[in-house]
Image (cartoon, coloured by chain):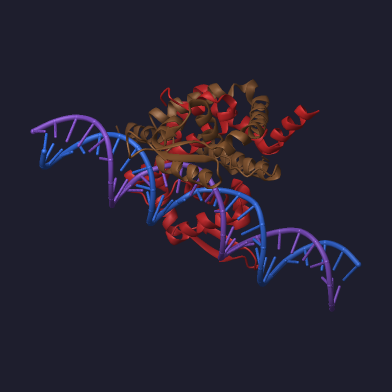
Chain colours: A red, B brown, C blue, D purple
Amino acid sequence: MENNDFVKELGYLGFTMRLKRISDAMMHEGRRLYSELDVDIEPNWYVIFKLLKSRGAQSVTEIAESIKMAHPSVIHITNKMMDAGYLISEKDPTDSRKRVLDLSTRSIKMLPEYEKIWNAGEKGVEEALKEIDALTFISILEEKFFNKGFKERTLEQLNNKKS
Amino acid sequence: MENNDFVKELGYLGFTMRLKRISDAMMHEGRRLYSELDVDIEPNWYVIFKLLKSRGAQSVTEIAESIKMAHPSVIHITNKMMDAGYLISEKDPTDSRKRVLDLSTRSIKMLPEYEKIWNAGEKGVEEALKEIDALTFISILEEKFFNKGFKERTLEQLNNKKS
DNA sequence: TCTTTTTATGTAGTTGACTACGCAAATATA
DNA sequence: TATATTTGCGTAGTCAACTACATAAAAAGA
């Protein structure tokens, strides 16, 4: 990031945009990485792989809650994973509303290869960020902006000024 | 963020996803904020407003470079701002490829109102984050992941293991 | 000057996330 | 038991960002 970065000049006003820029950039890098390694998976799939491997089959809503995403997003991701043959889906026998997702045999077969990549990725991030304790930092961010969101904090400030 | 957060359990492997989750959440909150205040602008427009106000009229590419975004993204954002009457656009007299964008009189008129909101937003973020020196942190993130990206760091780790 | 390369902009197509809404099944309540 | 509410899933529609490609003008080079 060179010096001519206007967003940086904006101080805390530019904070959210800088956050978005970095996370977008990392996702695009992830996509390029997979494509360079000739691996036909997408950047956000690893969470689903890891989740189902670690906790076993889960329904759509359970997955959404586990990874804190909206359920339509989960449907979107897992449908693509199903199309690619990585997931199987069946109705819950006790509750016919639920659809339970699990790893396919293809997933089981491929996971060791993919985990090598994810481990390397994790290592790379860790090497770069351990000195600044990035995990603690991001936990604080989450604490500050998931509980009392950005909107609420802004409205508070607007009202402070009025009174 | 409650305890049942699988992504958090993933350590540095979950870092990029947590980053994305927060920045997405903040943008959605921004949208809700504007809608609640009945203001017809979008979360990412403020950078353009601020940029043109501070540096004067700029071409599409200049804007893209100033805020470090891809030029099609800038076109997309500024087209919508033009449709909403906030920007004017004219050809550069010395270089007919260039299209120079500037604030409209409507922008000039509305800016004071919008700046109140942005100031409150900035204040809210600052209050929440000044104690953890978030700006320094994000600068380090940028330094680490814009120069030598996520992909490169991962490939490095993959190769280390081989040798 | 003619040709080649670079630069500026625009379009198309991909992906990712969200909210809002609808429907059907399960659960709770009257 | 009949009705009302909640829950789970799915679709539609919105917005954001990117890459890849196309086109035209400007600049550079032969």
Query: Looking at the image, which is closer to me, D4 or B108?
Result: B108
Query: Looking at the image, which is closer to me, C1 or B123?
Result: C1
Q: Is residue A144 left or right of residue B98?
A: right
The C terminus of chain A, quarter of image: top right
Q: Residue at x 48, y 24 (%)?
A: B140
Q: Is residue B51 left or right of residue B31?
A: left
Q: Residue at x 59, y 57 (%)?
A: A60
Query: Looking at the image, which is closer to me, B39 or A103?
Result: B39
The N terminus of chain A, quarter of image: top left
As drawn, B126 above or below B158:
above
Q: Is residue A126 visible?
A: yes
Q: Residue at x 72, y 35 (%)?
A: A155
Q: Position of residue A106 (x, y in %)?
A: 42, 57
Q: Position of residue A104 (x, y in %)?
A: 46, 59
Q: Position of residue B110 (x, y in %)?
A: 63, 36
Q: Position of residue D16 (x, y in %)?
A: 51, 43
Q: Residue at x 50, y 24 (%)?
A: B139
